[in-house]
Amino acid sequence: MKKRLYSIVFMFVLTFVFAAVVSAVKVHNEERIQINQQVKLQRVILKVLGVPVDEKAPNRVVIQAFERRVKAIEVKQQTLYVGYGEGGKQITGYAFPVGGAGFWGPVYGMVSVDPEASRIMGIAFYRHSETPGLGARITETWFTQQFAGLPIFPVEGDKKIFFLKPAGPGKGPNELDAITGATGTSRAVEAFVNRDLDRFLREMWKQVKKG
Amino acid sequence: MVQVDAGTLLFAAIFTNNILLTNFLGLCPFLAISREIRSALGLGAAVVFVMTCTAVLNYLAYYYVLLPLNLDHFRYIVFIIIIAAFVQLVEMTVERFFPALYYILGIFLPLITVNCAILGASLFLIIREYTLVQSMAYGAGSGAGWMIAIVAVGAIREKVQKSAKLPKGLEGPALTLIITGIMALAFTAFSGMIQIQ
Amino acid sequence: MPKPLSSSQIFLQGLWNDNPVLRQILGICSTLAVTNLLVNTLVMNAGLIFTVGMSSLTVSILRNYTPMKIRMMAQTLIIASYVIIVDIAIAAYLPDISEALGPYVGLIITNCIVMGRCEAFAMKNRPWASFLDGLAMSLGYGAVLLIIAVIREPLGFGTLLGYRVMPEGFTPWTIMIMAPGAFFTLGLFVWFLRAKFPQTAEEKKQGH
């Protein structure tokens, strides 16, 4: 009986001590982790808006650049990031999140359009769970670069703003290369980017134009 | 949030994103046991069962207990405890009701607890934000995929070791790893198969 | 009672004679996945060394107070706690790498080496010796994985630690980024080592 009691007490004390240590470490680092998340998002936004920030730049440089060049506004309950030029007066573009179900997990990205919302300026995917070497290639430059300059316009019915077709020659103006061997991911990206672009044009853009 | 339906997920977890051949999980017992097909099948079945159930249990623990209490950083501890407890339960049940199976599996049953694939599956389903049904499908699929991989490689290995004269140093783990590599290569061929709407 | 090993003997045992990966083929699960990039491998190794070292140390300090029946539970709790600390530290100070490593840091808990050393060595030996043993084992393990990464990253990405090392015209071997590449590399490496340095009598028998 004494042995059993000792075992229980031992486990309790051990658990308590270690849980306390782990909690302390967590609390101590919580703020830092949150800032990391925030800065990560800011980096992506700055990148698609074409604001040059060194990849290795420390957090405060990124935060400064963001505060100088970007303003976040709420439009129809969604966040829109307005990019400004060096002087802080002229609008250089708009960025907004795109995302949806990928093949293996949710994909999070950011897309930017020019001040007239007529073309895409850039796109970047910053979080996903796709297969490395296949679906994960959506983060590669050759893939995201295709979107630059793509004209966007509201579409009716089943039509899409752009298509991802199997890689190869003979593409129309709104057809981009999908990723070979990653049909699932390619289809998913095509679906949610089209959906989010359309939603931006229909809902958010109207509001922004009004001022 | 993920659109994939449970059936496709199950299929994909077995073939295109096999937890062993793509994610490297569950290798330790794999290298030790894949000698005999019978034990490999028995172990595989046990793993499927444990993986599916712990995926569900850990999902519930995470979303209904840990997150609401803001204790999600303790998930590693909680998950492994749930897995250990469940395996203990399975071990006691098998010993009581299926003694023949218990004899075959021997020490490998409690070792399921430290099988990286079991904990790995639970961690992956959190990262990928699966629903309960998807978690179940993913757990079952991963377990089945693991079982298929272990049985297939075991069978090949058995055949090779019996019939071929191997160069020095190749026998054992080196051979198993190379066979696994070829099998992983073969499985990537499946990646073009899955189409989702 | 066998004579306790000297510090250098313990170290050597971990690094070479009993190298976990090469001799016992243990614990490759959690780290093999990240060996496609050298920097990820380095961070993962650091995490593992910390975990194995500290866990062995702690288990050894508590070994005379730990009831036999619950020692597994106690070891698991200790190991899991250190892994959580490593995970938080990486997330706080190396966020990009944390994202790339994903769940694999957490999987250090199930890494056979950690539990194996706690049970096989730390439970029976003094704290300093246990700490050294843990250190040596994880360093030996880490060394092998570093070699694998040094092969995989240049061939798969054309870079090493992010710096381009392959000539411009080189087409990367995508297969090296994916699972098969890792299996082949490790398999060939183990084959080479076993053929060149047969260690145990069993292995000598196999070398015909």
Image (cartoon, coloured by chain):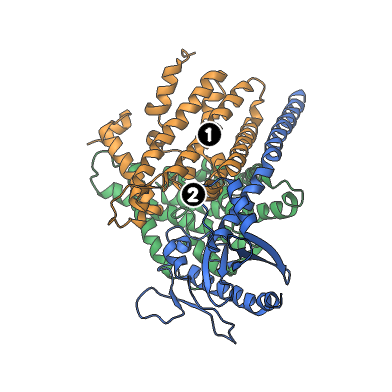
Screen quadrant of the C terminus of chain A = bottom right
Q: Nearer the viewer, residue A32 or C56?
A: A32
**Percent x, y of residue B183:** 37, 56
Q: Is residue B93 visible?
A: no
Q: Is residue C71 above or below residue B193?
A: above
**Percent x, y of residue A130:** 50, 61
**Percent x, y of residue A165:** 43, 76
| Residue B125 placement, left or right of C190 | right
Question: What's the chain of the residue with tag 1?
Answer: C
Chain B's colour?
green
- Helix, strand or loop status at disc 1: helix
Q: Which mark, residue C156?
A: none
Question: What's the chain of the residue with tag 2?
Answer: B
- Looking at the rendered structure, the kind of residue marked 2 is Leu
Residue at which label 2 appears? B25
Q: Is residue A8 above or below residue B156?
A: above
Chain C's colour?
orange
Q: Is residue C103 visible?
A: yes
Residue at which label 1 appears? C114
The total of numbered circles placed on residues is 2
- Looking at the rendered structure, the kind of residue marked 1 is Val
| Residue C149 placement, left or right of C204 | right
